[in-house]
Image (spheres, rainbow, N blue to C red):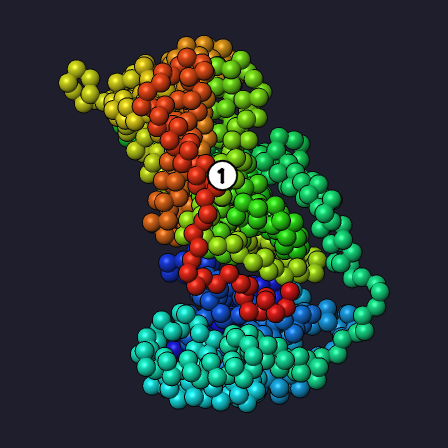
Amino acid sequence: MDIRIALAGNPNCGKTTLFNDLTGSNQSVGNWPGVTVEKKEGRLRGCGDVVIQDLPGIYSLSPYTLEEVVARGYLVNERPDAILNIVDGTNIERNLYLTTQLMELGLPVVVAVNMIDLVRKSGGRIDLAKLGEALGCTVVEMSALKKLGSREAAEAAVRAARGAAGGELPHVFTGSVEHALACIEESISGLVDQRCLRWYAIKVFERDEKVLEELALSSDLRSCLEQYIAECEKELGDDAESIITNQRYTYISSVVARTVQKKTAGHSLSASDKIDRIVTNRILALPIFAVVMFCIYAVAMGGWAVSIGTMGTDWANDVLFGEIVPGFFDTVLGALHVAEGSWIYGLIQDGIVAGVGAVLGFVPQMLVLFLLLAIVEDVGYMARVAFIMDRIFRRFGLSGKSFIPMLVATGCGVPGIMASRTIEQDRDRRMTIMTTGFIPCGAKMPIIGLFAGAVFGESALVAVSAFFIGIAAVVVSGIMLKKFRAFAGDPAPFVMELPAYHAPSAGNVLRTAWERGWSFIRRAGTVILLSSIVLWFLMGYGVVDGVFQAVEDNNDSLLAVIGGGVAVIFAPLGWVGDMAWKATTATFTGLIAKEEVVNFFGVAYHYAGEADLMEDASGIYAAVGADFGAMAAYSFMIFNLLCAPCFAAMGAIKREMNNTKWTLGAIGYMCGFAYVVSLIVFQIGGLFTGEAVFGLGTIAAAVLLAGILYLLFRRGYQGTGERARLTSVAAMRT
């Protein structure tokens, strides 16, 4: 039978570094069932029967964040054989708060004091023997980054697991609290696992809502327990949760005083502090961050000599999927005597190779981007960025960590959406995913360029307005969504460890970049494959003269028929006349890839094949300009900028949401918001240009505009009894 070791610790304590060192390539990455929190587990190298479970980084076992709920659910319900608690030796007092809670679960616990090299370098010393004696468990030292003591820590955890006995509980609480806990333990003894009776008693004392719901106590028993708690609160003059928190820290302070020696603080700052005085400066922070991200963007997705990501993508698109792969399949199909005009040939070359190649061609850019972001993360700079942006984003309901996904999304929405996983709070993560797609990505630029040139005389203001519309959509959505119950409440308390700057670990960086890249290849690639096949079929076949057959003119295709039938939905947006089905169909083809919008117009206006649209666009400009008025064109552009992203991005949304209902909700919100904004723009703007006449559409636009203003300024949802405080550890030590 496998031995299961759970890695638990605060964020940025070195837990992931340790996990990677212990498991190497013998690990799997997924999501915890039903939630977006990442789940990692792997087998200990050299010990095939030992499974290491990497729990999310948490500050406590209180149910304030999704990560805390997931971690404590696993520890209480799944009950691993032992817990390896990683403690940051440079911040030991704060880290031990979680340790005291882990000890109460009745599981064998081994404490691994990480970053011991930094402790000694700073002139400090930790007496491990005394610390272990005080905590009632085994304590070892290590430096996960330098791979010192990692194996020994794991082996100590395995020995503790085989011993199968929890350590002696430390005496954390005073007599009155212990009396109340003893009464609670006696009252609930038959309702919970005896091994974690102590933990349940403390949670009942704290009035933990999830535990109380789980226990389903009778009203009489609950009243009796409430009396014990109330008497203790009256005696100590504080609420139950604060009493527990205060006494934990009192105990921890006494332990640290006996076991930890720190060098007397002088006037000199550490290297990290000196750097932070510059990179987190109120004036310099944003310019420095802009320069850093510009450099990352330049290398990954720019058009400069240093843009190795773009070079790789150009080669992948032009050579690999432009010549090599199609040539290979041409050879194979020729050897199999498959005619070039047959449906099998079209399915493979136009449906599969072209469709999948259009997505996989961006992999080099994404791998370079993920690699550079992983380096910046591992160094410790990204934690500072989130801190810098938090003060801005908090004004409209998002966390500072939401800025990174939106910035990345200017290159491509897929990695932007995937970057949202760095946001711990589930509701903030979901809202970030729902709004990141509003930011104009590189694939949307041809749409802006086409209509700016065809209708607006190549006005640069139109292109600039697209970015402002995207940013405005994020801000407006953030304010509105925060008023609803699913997103209500203040953004997650900004409690983030600012780790000391250190050289990045090559193994961690490469592994992180590959995990993110492979997720894109696996998930997005499968979605785009199916969608490309469907689009190929709909564009290539139709009914001509009463016979279902392959068509030469796309105007006779099934897609044209479907587009014409659906076009009525978009009539209020100004999509009417001969261009109605073309605009509708172009929008739907844009779901495959936003670049397809311009390509479809080239085909629909019989311009494809004559010249490259971006090199000689005069013909297509004239054709599009003849069909689209100014407001209809602007409405079309806005809708395609704000509506559901491409299938690849939708696949990323599904991957990050990990919930079908929320995925459909996110896509539905983006489409609905895009429709409403486009309707308002055309109906009200069209009154001034003469493209729209006053009618039901205008009235609907006015009502919707009033509705948006109401949602912006109304008082949001105020949950009854909702806790709006920091986690217990954050509340006491900030």
Q: Amino acid at mark 1?
A: Val
Which residue is denoted by mark 1 in the rendering?
A: 476
The residue lying at 64 percent from left, 41 percent from top is 293
Q: Residues within 10 Å of mark 1 (few under 14, many from 20)?
A: some
Give residue 263's quadrant in the image. Answer: bottom right
Q: Quadrant of the N terminus?
A: bottom left
Q: Is residue 490 above or below residue 1?
A: above
Residue with the most extreme right position: 267
Q: How many marks?
A: 1
Q: Secondary structure at mark 1?
A: helix
Viewer can see residue 599 = no
- Which residue is nearer to you in this view: 396 or 713? 713
Q: Is residue 122 left or right of residue 611?
A: right
The residue lying at 36 percent from left, 40 percent from top is 668
The residue lying at 45 percent from left, 49 percent from top is 716
Q: Is residue 586 above or below residue 139?
A: above
Viewer can see residue 627 = yes
Q: Is residue 635 left or right of residue 580?
A: right
- Which residue is nearer to you in this view: 141 or 266? 266
Task: Estimate the x, y position of residue 59 in percent, counting from the top left.
Answer: 56, 67
The residue lying at 84 percent from left, 68 percent from top is 266
